[in-house]
């Protein structure tokens, strides 16, 4: 009986869905490796997250459930110990399951240096772990003298003071009023956080046994803010002009072009590491038996509608990139399927020949990837939530229900930039979405 396929899951943080060279959006970001991967697989331009914030999004991903999962409601909540994850199911089926970088499944406990949290990732199913903090959190851990592999790496290379100085200049050591800028990082690329993550990914691939299937989840900290690429990457965009933000705040003094060049430069750096990772899998002779997924937890507003970061219901924060390639899948295909972040776990399980639990709200994309069902039959709608708001995409409409019950409605077919709330024009449609979102996901559509 042939060995189950390997699973390579490439997962940067805060990567907008429309920022890929192959996306055809006119954004001049250079992602040749991901573009080539898309030519060998399927790209999902309508993919969205289930919650546009790191920890809640990753909880939905890992468990295949809708927000809030196990009390993970904010950015510093931990997925409770013992929570069922698709990683755990892979491990029980004989997979070697590895992770590196910033996975945020036990974020608060990790940042506190809670020793009792050490077994958590193993309980979630990981057999090999090379975790490290994200950009700002690494600085806070250094200041508070807490253990972190990336912080220790900087100390060993006598670079921790330069790192903290860079973060202080960007106001990233405070919780509010962070300075948004697109300046290059003080550190050389060899000491940059995404490069540290990439080297750990290569080490994990090299250590994988050939006698068992493996799954590797690579969590690049970038292109999450601050917008701080190494200088050599930033110089590659020195003469490039990007589209300006949609409906920006006219009082915002930010140099949007500088920020966008920096954001793209971080992406290009990650793309280069993805090439090295794919080359490492190829050198093992395993590329033909490996499914590859590229995605992200949420997007980044980049000044659209006067907003920065994520945690909002706008498309810049909700849309995520999703490219999947591997043996027996469609090639050079663009699927209009309404894919959700949580669907990735169900898809990887089915790729491994493991039944998707009935408890999963997620749906496997494998039938779409193999051309066994029409793309439109994957989902009829998409759902995302955070805090007190809920949003739904169905047909041409996107509805956002606020805590007070007010519904904003956008006609994405004619207004993809969400500039006009049409709830007053079609009140019955807005009322339908309002009733639905007040009860979903506890009540199915047919009961409303």
Image (cartoon, grey):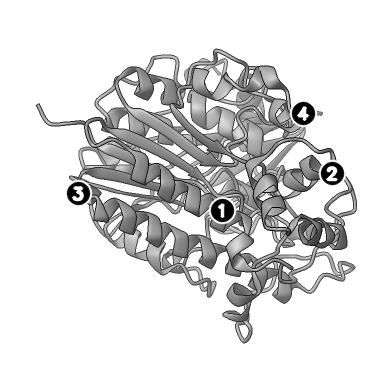
Mark 1 near mark 2, Cβ–Cβ under 8 Å? Answer: no
Residue occupied by mark 4: 112
Disc 1 residue crowd, few under 14, some 14–19, many 20+, Cα 10 Å:
many
In this view, 74 is above or below 140: above
Q: Earlier in the sequence, mark 3 or mark 4?
A: 4
User: Mark 3 falls on what kind of element?
Assistant: helix
Q: Earlier in the sequence, mark 1 or mark 2?
A: 2
Alpha carbon of mark 3 to alpha carbon of mark 4: how far? 42 Å
Q: Earlier in the sequence, mark 2 or mark 3?
A: 2
Mark 2 near mark 4, Cβ–Cβ under 8 Å? Answer: no
Q: Position of residue 420 (x, y in %)?
A: 70, 55
Relative to 209, is 382 on the left or the right? right
Residue occupied by mark 1: 196
Disc 2 residue crowd, few under 14, some 14–19, many 20+, Cα 10 Å:
few
Residue occupied by mark 3: 288
Residue occupied by mark 2: 143
Q: Earlier in the sequence, mark 1 or mark 3?
A: 1
Alpha carbon of mark 2 to alpha carbon of mark 3: how far? 45 Å
């Amino acid at each position: 009986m042939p060995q189950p396929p390997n699973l390579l899951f490439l997962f940067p943080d805060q990567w907008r869905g429309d920022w890929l060279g192959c996306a055809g959006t006119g954004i001049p970001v250079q992602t040749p490796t991901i573009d080539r991967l898309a030519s060998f697989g399927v790209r999902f331009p309508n993919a969205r997250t289930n919650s546009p914030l790191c920890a809640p999004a990753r909880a939905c991903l890992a468990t295949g459930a809708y927000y809030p999962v196990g009390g993970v409601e904010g950015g510093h909540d931990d997925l409770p110990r013992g929570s069922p994850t698709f990683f755990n199911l892979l491990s029980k089926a004989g997979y070697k399951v590895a992770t590196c970088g910033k996975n945020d499944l036990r974020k608060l406990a990790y940042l506190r240096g809670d020793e009792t949290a050490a077994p958590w990732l193993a309980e979630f199913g990981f057999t090999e772990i090379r975790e490290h903090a994200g950009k700002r959190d690494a600085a806070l851990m250094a200041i508070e003298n807490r253990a972190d592999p990336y912080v220790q790496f900087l100390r060993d290379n006598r670079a921790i003071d330069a790192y903290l100085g860079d973060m202080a200049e960007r106001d990233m050591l405070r919780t509010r009023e962070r300075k948004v800028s697109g300046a290059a990082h003080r550190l050389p690329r060899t000491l940059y956080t995404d490069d540290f993550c990439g080297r750990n990914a290569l080490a994990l691939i090299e250590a994988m046994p050939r006698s068992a299937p493996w799954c590797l989840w690579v969590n690049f900290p970038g292109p999450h803010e601050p917008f701080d690429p190494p200088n050599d990457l930033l110089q590659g965009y020195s003469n490039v002009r990007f589209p300006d933000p949609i409906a920006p705040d006219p009082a915002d003094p930010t140099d949007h072009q500088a920020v966008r060049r920096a954001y793209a430069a971080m992406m290009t750096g990650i793309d280069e590491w993805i090439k090295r990772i794919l080359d490492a899998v190829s050198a093992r002779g395993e590329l033909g038996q490996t499914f590859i997924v590229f995605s992200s937890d949420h997007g980044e507003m980049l000044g659209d509608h006067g907003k920065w970061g994520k945690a909002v219901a706008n498309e810049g924060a909700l849309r995520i990139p999703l490219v999947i390639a591997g043996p027996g899948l469609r090639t050079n295909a663009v699927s209009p399927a309404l894919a959700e972040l949580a669907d990735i776990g169900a898809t990887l399980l089915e790729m491994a020949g493991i039944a998707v639990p009935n408890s999963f709200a997620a749906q496997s994309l494998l039938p779409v990837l193999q051309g066994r069902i029409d793309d439109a039959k994957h989902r009829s709608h998409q759902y995302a939530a955070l805090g007190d708001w809920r949003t739904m995409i169905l047909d041409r409409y996107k509805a956002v229900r606020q805590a007070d019950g007010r519904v904003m409605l956008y006609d994405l077919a004619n207004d993809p930039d969400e500039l006009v709330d049409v709830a007053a024009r079609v009140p019955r449609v807005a009322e339908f979405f309002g009733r639905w979102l007040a009860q979903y996901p506890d009540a199915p559509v047919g009961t409303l």
